[in-house]
Image: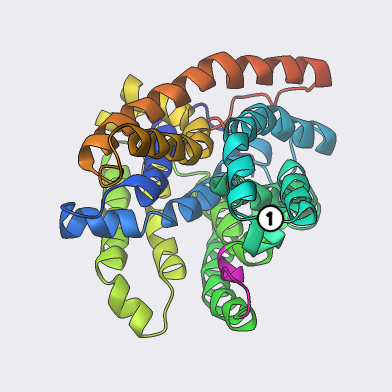
Amino acid sequence: MTTAPAGHVRPLTSLRFVAAFWVLCHHALPRERAGAAGAAFAETGWLGVSLFFVLSGFLLMLRYAPDGALRGSKRDFWLERVARLAPTYLLALTFALPLLVRDARVQDLSASLTAWIAVSALTLQQAWRPETACAWNCPAWSLSVETWFYLVFPLLFVVLGRWLMRAPSRGALLLGGSMVASIVIFPTLESLSGAWPLPLFSLSPLSRWPEFTAGIGLAALAARWRPADARGGWIALSLGLVWIASTIVNRSAIVAAGGHLLPLALPGFALVILGAWGLRGVRAGVLESPGLVLLGEASYALYLLHAPLHSYVLALTNRVVGRGFDTSWAVFSLYVPLALGLSVAVYHWVERPARARLRARFGITRPNDPATARA
């Protein structure tokens, strides 16, 4: 079976912004006077990282292995990832460096611990030590997890690729198996890591692989789906949103029963991604609007820069008007446009040109067709 990689799917790009903005709200949205729905949305915003992971597996599969075999060399794949991620990642660390220096001084961190924080972040290994993973630009820990997935991805298809793409049912098997694995792995690692200051299951690359493989299985299942109109896409998208909303609304009951939100949210993420994929080439309304697509293109910069920017905004607010205003809606309403504007500027003036220069320097051969949603 031969499956040509799809071109740029605007609804998937827009979905990237939704995931990034969800994480931003988790860190910055004032809970007071947000209403029950707003508070629930912000409280569960950490799930946006999981949506990113599933989407990453889905997009990489459709761009680099649409037939089950890696398109191009492993070298080109790995260097493409460096060109795609490194410039903005290093810029974000530089942007957050004054905060690291401040925290090291205020918390009286030892020289050895500060050195570990710096080296682990620069080498993308911080997710392996949860108590320091957030010490220098907290959202960057997820890039540590992604790095290990990128390392394994080309090797995975040497063993699995041709078998996986032989029939859509095998994609469904991998998708379902990944969801079941996440239900088992998360509580197991949590029970083994009770002594860690942060729960190991939420940060370790060992526990996040089911989200990536769920995306791969979804891509194998859906690669040949060519909807005749928008109805199928909108149905899948709507069902996914209802599923996710139900998980958020019932979060307290789920946790009280010993469950975990992330494994239960995975089917909703899969449906939302499937719905956005099903809207390619048809009228997708706001999901293909130029503004939202641009924000989706800039979502990587938004994800990495929003937390340190928020820290700077809060510090400035405290200095100028005093404490008590730093969690106000007025500050949030000023912070959000700043964050969006900064991310778009970084995307246009740093991320894109730096990626092009690095690709040229590395001599990377581009796959025959651009990635869905710029994987």
Main SS of the magenta segment? Answer: loop
In this view, 47 is above or below 147: below
- Which residue does the image show at 47% across and 33% down from the upper left? 302
- Which residue does the image show at 37% across and 26% down from the upper left? 338
- Which residue does the image show at 62% across and 67% down from the upper left? 207
- Can you tell which quarter of the image residue 319 is in? top left
- Can you tell which quarter of the image residue 44 is in? bottom left
In this rendered view, identify the residue nearer to me: 145 or 78. Answer: 145
Span of residues in magenta: 195-202
- Which residue does the image show at 62% across and 77% down from the upper left? 189
Pointer 1 local density, CA inside 10 Å: few below 14, some 14–19, many at least 20: few
Observer able to see residue 12: no
In this view, 197 is above or below 67: below
In this rendered view, identify the residue nearer to me: 275 or 37. Answer: 37
Observer able to see residue 276: yes
Image quadrant holding the N terminus, namely top right
Image x and y of residue 80, in percent: 73, 30
In this view, 267 is above or below 181: above
Number of dots carrying numbers = 1
In this view, 274 is above or below 189: above
Callout 1 secondary element = loop
Judging by the rendered image, the residue that carries numbered circle 1 is 109
Image x and y of residue 92, in percent: 59, 33
Query: From the viewer's perspective, is 133 left or right of 228?
Result: right
Type of amino acid under label 1: Leu
In this rendered view, identify the residue nearer to me: 307 or 82. Answer: 307
Image quadrant holding the C terminus, namely top right
In this rendered view, identify the residue nearer to me: 144 or 107. Answer: 107
Query: From the viewer's perspective, is 91 left or right of 244?
Result: right
Image x and y of residue 169, in percent: 55, 62
Residue 164 colored in magenta in the image: no
Image x and y of residue 298, in percent: 47, 27
